Amino acid sequence: MQSSTAIGRMLYSRFALASLLALALVMVTVFGDVQGRSIRRGRVGPVTIKRCQSLGDPHFTTLNGLQYDFQGLGDYVFAKTRDGKFTVHTRTGRWGAGASVNVNAAVDLGNDRTFEYDVEQDVFYVDGEKTEIKVGQKFKLGSGTVERVGQTAAIVTSKNGARMTMNWYRHPQWKHQLGSSGYISLVIDMPSNVEVSQGLCLTQTHSNLQARGILHNHKARKIVRFTDPKKITARRKKWAKKVCTKAGLSHKKNPNAFRACVLDTIQSGKKIGKTIAKNIKKIKKLEKKGNKKYLRALKQKLDKEVSDVIRKKEIEISKLQKIAKEVRASSEIKKKKCIAKNNKKAEDAEHDVKKAQQKLVELTLRMKRRALRILKKAARKARKLAQKARRLARIAKRKATRKAIRAARKAKRLAKQAQRRARRLARKERALARKAKRAARRAAKKAAWKKAKQERAARRAARKARRAALKAARKARRAAKKAKKTGTRRARKSARRAKRAARKAALKAKRAQKKLEREKRRAARRAKRAARKARRERRRQCLRIA
């Protein structure tokens, strides 16, 4: 009984430790996040906003603050956010000699809900259909809102925080003078966490992107200059600056707008420049008013989101605290039950241990007997296997010796055969060598005999030629002597003939000599060829033998 109580106490202490550890883990999971992060109720810090704009004929300022002018004609992607909740397409039309302006602007606010304004017709389009929108009217569209804030201004806001301010100015006479009835200036503001993936708001190189599906009637793009734009001289620049400052624009407050106004005044003239400057000033006023409202709305929205998150966290914490209390209560009840159970288990365990000890003793005795039997059997088998192995070794030894003897005899036989073949081949070689030598000697003798024969024939021919020449010379001398004695015509003729005959004979002798020399050379060549042939034959025969 004492041992059972000791086991019970030990089990109880282990259970208590385990329950304490579990409780500690629960407390860490419940309160760890709250204490580590220290969530407070309060307002969100200052919100950073990035801006992109297209003013006048159009002067672009990207989201990174870069400035450039672009004079293309057609439909372009102005800005498209990565989440697809805010996409702006613009259409540019001709403006004077060498410039272009925004004549149409359309926004997609998600779920294919679009808003569009066409300055040429002075018409609004909602989802591709003509719609009348009054001043001050505000309505929801897709994931955002559209508001007409003035006679020539509207603001479009998206759910992701992006906002577009558009301001337009139109005059019917401008269609004939400049090519377009008016122009639209666009300003886009958005929080710094909203990403733009495409459009002229990023870089001018995005002008080659397809701008389809938002504008109600797509037009193909082309970059055209009807005439070269006016040069920006110092005098024109000074005059344009005066016009823009009179219109109420400041270089210090709005440097980008002031620059756009100066360039437009140089290209379009004083009257149109003034109207552009006034329009830009209106846009800036609208921006200031709109930005304040926009920032307030953004802050309120973020404050609400943060407070919702805090509430949710507090609810989660309260739930977890309740769970922790329940766990504590249930753990105390379980402790008491477990102590009683463990005492019973300890007694049962003691009884089981005794039984197990008896069984172990019996099993060990059985196993010993069985092991002895197995060892005896194994010893018998080992003896039999050893005897069998010896027998097999003897048989293998005999077989190996027989095989070795046979192999040695075979090797001797093969060696003798190889020796015989070698002797035969050597004899053949010698015989062939002798034959080749004989053939070479015969060929040499033949060549020498032919050479001698040809030399003899050549000598004979030379002798004959000499004799003929001598005869002809004698005849000529005789004829000459006769001619001197007689002095007749016939004698002279015969002397001439004799001289000719002597010359011919001398020529024949020379030719014969040359022929003899040629024949000698030919004979020498033939002898050399015959010697070469004999050598080749020897080599071939040697190779065949090998």
Image: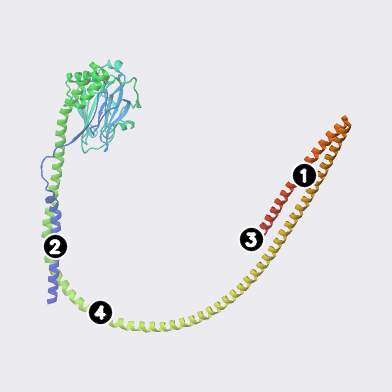
Q: Amino acid at mark 1?
A: Ala
Question: Mark 2–mark 3 contact, CB under 8 Å?
Answer: no
Say which label, 4 or 3, has the lower sequence index.
4
Indicate which label's residue lies in the foreground, 2 or 1: 1
Mark 3 crowd level (few <14, some 14–19, many ≥20, 10 Å Cα) = few
Residue of label 1: 512
Q: Residues within 10 Å of mark 1 (few under 14, many from 20)?
A: many
Query: Is disc 1 placed on a helix, strand or loop?
Result: helix
Residue 194: horizontal and vertical position, in percent? 23, 37
Give the quadrant of the N terminus.
bottom left
Q: Is residue 476 above or below residue 150?
A: below
Quadrant occupied by the C terminus:
bottom right
Tell me the distance, in whole angstroms, between the alpha carbons under discs 1 and 3: 46 Å
Q: How many marks?
A: 4
Judged left or right of residue 528, residue 103 is: left
Which of the numbered marks, if any, corresponds to residue 543?
3
**Picture quadrant where residue 424 is located:** bottom right
Select label 1 or label 3 by which is in front.
1
Q: Is residue 140 above or below residue 172?
A: below
Q: Name the residue carrying label 4.
A: 360
In the rendered structure, which amino acid carries the disc numbered 3? Leu
Between residue 315 and residue 267, name the one nearer to us.
Answer: 267
Mark 2, residue position: 19
SS for callout 3: helix
Q: Would you call the spot at circle 2 few (<14 residues within 10 Å), some (14-19), or many (20 or more)?
A: some
Say whether marks 4 and 3 touch (CB < 8 Å): no
Residue 83 pos. (x, y %): 26, 38
- Nearest the viewer among 46 and 244 is 244
Mark closest to the chain's N terminus, 2 or 3: 2
Decide if residue 317 is in sight here: no
Which mark lies nearer to you, 4 or 1? 1
